[in-house]
Image (spheres, rainbow, N blue to C red):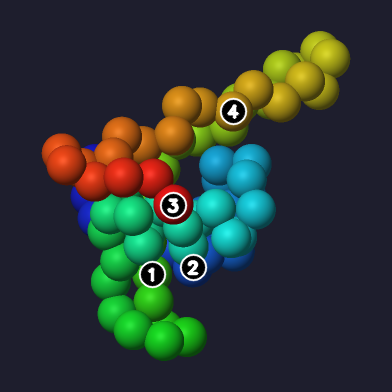
Amino acid sequence: MPLVLVTATDAAYYTGRPVGTIWRWASEGRIARYGTGKAVRYNLAQLPRKTVDDWTGEVTLGDPPALPEGARAA
């Protein structure tokens, strides 16, 4: 998959989680950050995709990215 960079808002929609979770994952080192400040972007390939059932509309979230070796969760 080619490198696709998205904003935190787009990443939150893709994963089905709040923007704050995307920021926390980046600060913990679970996902990479590209850029600084308001121009920061996240690699879509590193994010767990949510799935939506066509019949029921039920949303299933993917497993969060793993913590790097030796890191502790916030």
Q: Residue sitting at 46 percent across and 57 percent down?
A: 24
Q: Residue sitting at 65 percent across and 53 percent down?
A: 18
Q: For the residues marked 4 and 1, what is the alpha-carbon distance in whole angstroms?
A: 21 Å
Near mark 4 (Cα within 10 A), the count class, few <14, some 14-19 or many ≥20, is some
Q: Quadrant of residue 5?
A: bottom left
Going from the N terminus, do you reach mark 4 or mark 3 first?
A: 4
67 above or below 42?
above
Q: Quadrant of residue 57?
A: top right
Near mark 1 (Cα within 10 A), the count class, few <14, some 14-19 or many ≥20, is many
Near mark 3 (Cα within 10 A), the count class, few <14, some 14-19 or many ≥20, is few
Label pair 4/1, CB-CB below 8 angstroms: no
Q: Please give the residue where the numbered disc 4 appears in the rendered image.
A: 61
Q: For the residues marked 1 and 2, what is the alpha-carbon distance in whole angstroms?
A: 5 Å
Q: Quadrant of residue 67?
A: top left
Q: For the residues marked 1 and 3, what is the alpha-carbon distance in whole angstroms?
A: 21 Å
Q: Please give the residue where the numbered disc 3 appears in the rendered image.
A: 74
36 relative position to 24: left or right: left
Q: Looking at the picture, which amino acid does disc 4 mark?
A: Leu
Which of labels 4 and 2 is toward the front? Answer: 4
Q: Please give the residue where the numbered disc 1 appears in the rendered image.
A: 41
